Image (cartoon, rainbow, N blue to C red):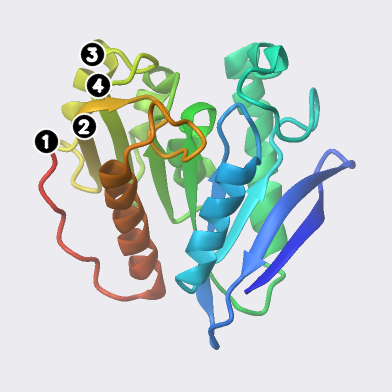
Amino acid sequence: MQRKDIKVRSSEGEEFDCYLVTPDAAGKAPAIVLASAVHGVDQDMRALVDEFAAHGYIAAAPDLFWRSVPGPLARDDDRTKTRSQPRLEKIEAGEADLADTLAEVRKLPQFNGRAAAMGFCYGGPYAILGPKRLGYAAGISCHGTQMLDYIKELDGVGAPVCIIWGDQDHAAPAPVQEAYRAVPSRMKNVEVHIFPGVLHGYMMHGNAKAFSEETYRFSMSRALAILDGLRGAEREPLRKAS
């Protein structure tokens, strides 16, 4: 794999940081762009980028907080409470970053022209906004927050969208999860998985209290299956979720 910390030229004129890894495999491949949690592109996010690239996909994680407090922050850093607020305004600004990152990925000769957006916590809404209007061919959200504000954005989306939570996620209370549970019955392209006893932040190895190996592996398997579909291969059948 080739790991690089690059600068992406923003459509606003400035540059922002992005961690980019390209696979060693020959031929063209889909890409996945990771929208981070509020902690930014920390070791957990970089490890996820590396894992996707190890499976043969182009993977990137842009710094969505370059306008306020750039770079990764520790979990106990008080600046995490302010750099993502006001949330709806910040998410809207970050749409340009997801589009600009995809434009950068399009320059790579290995890119096959199809990409998924995968969001974690703060970045969860981009799993919907990516395929809705940013040029992405699929979206995956793991323990996404503020998701009820974006459920109507699913209307008109025909691309694969996968939403995953634990039922003990304090940032996605029962009414939010129930609203999303109802979506797959009317939208066959949307899958929703909710796992018992799993906490917010289950994808992050650095979050010792919340990390769930089983749910992490399930989430990775779904993301990889969706990426396989972007190669043109047949998607694997959905596994039963609780």
- The residue that disc 1 covers is 242
Q: Amino acid at mark 2?
A: Ile
Residue with the most extreme front position: 208
Q: Which mark is residue 177?
A: 4
Q: Which mark is residue 174?
A: 3
User: Are the residues tagged 1 and 2 within 8 Å (C-beta)?
Assistant: yes
Q: Amino acid at mark 3?
A: Ala
Task: Give the residue drawn at x 65%, y 19%.
Answer: 84
Q: What's the distance in space between the residues labelled 4 and 3, CA to CA?
A: 5 Å
Closer to the camera in the image, 75 or 24: 75
- The residue that disc 2 covers is 194
Residue with the most extreme bottom position: 26
- Locate the C terminus by quadrant: top left
User: Are the residues tagged 4 and 1 within 8 Å (C-beta)?
Assistant: no
- Is 202 placed left or right of 52 in the picture? left
User: Are the residues tagged 2 and 4 within 8 Å (C-beta)?
Assistant: yes
Closer to the camera in the image, 216 or 143: 216
Q: Earlier in the sequence, mark 1 or mark 2?
A: 2
- Is 89 placed left or right of 234 in the picture? right
Q: Earlier in the sequence, mark 4 or mark 1?
A: 4
Task: Give the residue drawn at x 30%, y 36%.
Answer: 164
User: Are the residues tagged 4 and 3 within 8 Å (C-beta)?
Assistant: yes
